[in-house]
Amino acid sequence: MSTLYPFLLYIHIVSAIMSIGPFFVLIPMVKKLREASEQEEQAYVNTFRFVIQLAKHAGHVLVVSGILLLLSGPWAWTTSWVLMTIIVMVSSLFFLARAFSPTLRKLRDSQQDRAKLVQKLQRAIWIYLALLGIMLWFMVTKPVLW
């Protein structure tokens, strides 16, 4: 392991916090979105967009630092927890791309069922947090699955 390893690990952990943490702010915000006026709704939607952008950019740092950690650390790409993390990460990327932005766009359309869209956002937050939690569990516990 290189002397750069602890720094990369720190960057990796901070980027994980930045990609997971802001989604917890959205949980109470979804409840407020249910009764929000049009002007308030726009503020909440902008906050959702900001959190999603932050998570995407922190995710980029997370992936790059993870690759560098693998290259400089003791684990191989074929380690079970590494492969499972990658599989869940790819799934979460597809989910993130399809779960939030289309729903937020539909919220602007007054013809859409607002309650159903807010419910969809709430469900998407919990599913995304679960996926991120699974990845976090793999990285922290490093289970030997095969």
Image (cartoon, rainbow, N blue to C red):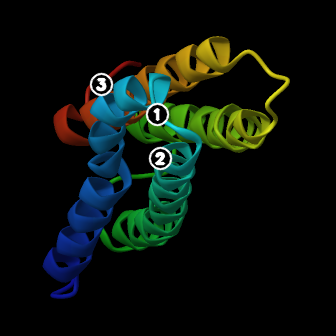
Task: Give the position of the N terminus as an image quadrant.
Answer: bottom left
In the rendered image, residue 7, in percent from the top left (x then y), is placed at: 18, 81
Q: Nearer the viewer, residue 140 or 28?
A: 28
For the point 38% across and 54% down, the residue is 19
Can residue 75 be seen by looking at this rendering?
yes
- Residue 142 picture quarter: top left
Q: Nearer the viewer, residue 140 or 48?
A: 48
In the rendered image, residue 4, in percent from the top left (x then y), is placed at: 22, 86
Residue type, mark 2 in image: Glu
Determine whether, in the image, residue 1 is placed left or right of residue 84. Answer: left
Residue 36's disc is: 1
Tag count in the figure? 3
Q: Residue furthest bottom?
A: 3
Disc 3 marks which residue?
Answer: 144
Residue type, mark 1 in image: Ala
Disc 2 marks which residue?
Answer: 40
Residue 135, placed above or below residue 63? above
Of marks 1 and 3, which one's residue comes earlier in the chain? 1
Determine whether, in the image, residue 15 is placed left or right of residue 122. Answer: left
Front: mark 2 or 3: 2
Q: Residues within 10 Å of mark 2 (few under 14, many from 20)?
A: few
Q: Mark 1 touching mark 2, by CB under 8 A?
A: yes
Q: Residues within 10 Å of mark 3 (few under 14, many from 20)?
A: few
Of marks 2 and 3, which one's residue comes earlier in the chain? 2
Q: Mark 1 touching mark 3, by CB under 8 A?
A: no
